[in-house]
Image (cartoon, grey):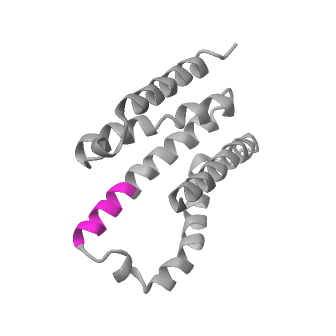
Amino acid sequence: MQSIIWALIAAIGYGISSPLAKIAFNKELHTHGFTFSYGIALILFSAPSIIAAGGFGVIFPTTGALWFGIASGGICALGLMAHAEALSIKTSLVSVVAILAATYPLISSAISLPLMGEAEKLEIPRLLIGAVLIIMGGYLTATSIK
């Protein structure tokens, strides 16, 4: 249940941040300024939990955890930068960019099902139906521009 609550908070945060980012870009904010602001905010929001957890040694208890954390953070940052670039284009529409960017669960599922053994924990036909709906939604969204 706790993971569902955090996922909903993430959805609300991402949902609100895209329109705000587009407004900032329309007011001439550069994408580098956006990603810098995002990084500063992330540090400020993360610092209390890092301190409460006992510092970086607790957060990255092994070298493997550190490198997977760095890889995940770097790839996520690349995605954030691409999202920012898409929103910064004057003719881009938040309604389209946000929905297309939100199709990332397809990639996450394609990786986690075989590599993390999640297939045994899921009803695959239902998962595939959900994936098809995401693909259909992405197609309909991408082709909805007048």
Residue 66 in the image: state x and y as whole percent.
30, 68
In the displayed structure image, the side of residue 10 where residue 105 appears, left or right: left
Farthest residue in the top direction? Answer: 146
Which residue is nearer to you in this view: 105 or 3?
3
Name the residue nearer the viewer: 91 or 123: 123
Query: Left or right: where does residue 107 sit relative to residue 29?
Result: left
Identify the residue at image location x=36%, y=41%. 122
**Residue 125 figure quarter:** top left
- Front-lying residue, 65 or 112: 112
Magenta residues, start to end: 63-72
Q: Is residue 33 left or right of residue 115?
A: right
Residue at 34 percent across and 82 percent down: it is 57
Picture mark count: 0
Q: Where's the C terminus, which quadrant? A: top right
Q: x, y (%) of residue 140?
A: 58, 18
Q: Is residue 21 magenta?
A: no
Q: Position of residue 2 (x, y in %)?
A: 54, 62
Where residue 42 appears, x then y in whole percent? 56, 65
Determine the residue positioned at 45% across, 26% down: 129
In screen coordinates, is 56 left or right of 145? Answer: left
Question: Which secondary structure class fits the magenta region best?
Answer: helix
Residue pictured at 25% horizontal, 74% vertical: 62
| Res. 143 image quadrant | top right
Q: Is residue 20 above or below residue 98?
A: below
